[in-house]
Image: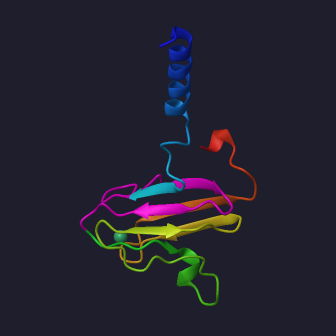
């Protein structure tokens, strides 16, 4: 093989393997843990319309419930219902705003989602 062609191929392969989006899931992942801080990361910032997925690798059932769901009226932005062990809950996206949430079963488990109305800045990644 032509050595220049070989070098070009290797460069192209290197570029693709280093492409940051290739191995990144198309959503922000939050892992549930049995100990503090329970939601990892506890605080996330995403741009509007960007999906978020919670994963429950614990041996216990949990919920991901917007605090607005605990009040009267229609301030409930999201409520996972019971998340079984190894279950996941995915939100397709949220309107801009700040969304504190908790686990209905263990209210000590709390996190917060901040949704911005623009593209995510590198400093927030
Ligand atoms: Cu819980």
The residue under the point 37% across, 78% down is 82
Q: Quadrant of residue 88?
A: bottom left
Answer above or below: position of 15 versus 114: above
Image check: 81 left or right of 75?
Answer: left
- In magenta, the rendered stretch is 32-59
Q: Position of residue 115 (x, y in %)?
A: 66, 60
Answer above or below: position of 41 versus 83: above
The residue lying furthest to the left in this view is 59
The residue under the point 60% across, 77% down is 77
The residue lying furthest to the top in this view is 3
Magenta-drawn stretch contains 48: yes
Image check: 1 left or right of 125?
Answer: left
Q: Position of residue 66 (x, y in %)?
A: 54, 74
Count of picture labels: 0
Q: Position of residue 33 (x, y in %)?
A: 34, 58
Indicate the quadrant of ligand 1 in the picture: bottom left
Answer above or below: position of 77 versus 110: below
Of 21 and 58, the residue lying toward us: 21
The residue lying furthest to the right in this view is 118
Magenta-drawn stretch contains 53: yes
Q: Quadrant of residue 59?
A: bottom left
Quadrant for the C terminus in the image: top right
Image check: 82 left or right of 78?
Answer: left
The residue lying furthest to the bottom in this view is 73
**Type of colouring:** rainbow
Q: Position of residue 96 (x, y in %)?
A: 71, 64
The residue under the point 58% across, 61% down is 113
Of 25 and 47, the residue lying toward us: 25
Of 52 and 33, the residue lying toward us: 52
């Amino acid at each position: 093989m032509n050595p220049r062609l070989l070098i070009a191929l290797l460069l192209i392969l290197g570029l693709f393997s280093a492409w940051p989006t290739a191995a990144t899931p198309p959503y922000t992942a939050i892992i549930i843990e049995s100990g503090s801080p329970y939601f990892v990361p506890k605080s996330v910032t995403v741009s509007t319309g960007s999906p978020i997925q919670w994963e429950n690798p614990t041996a216990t059932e949990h919920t991901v419930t917007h605090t607005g769901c605990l009040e009267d009226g229609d301030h409930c932005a999201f409520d996972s219902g019971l998340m079984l062990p190894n279950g996941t809950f995915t939100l397709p996206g949220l309107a801009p705003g700040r969304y504190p949430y908790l686990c209905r079963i263990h209210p000590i488990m709390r996190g917060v989602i901040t949704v911005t109305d623009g593209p995510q800045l590198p400093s927030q990644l």
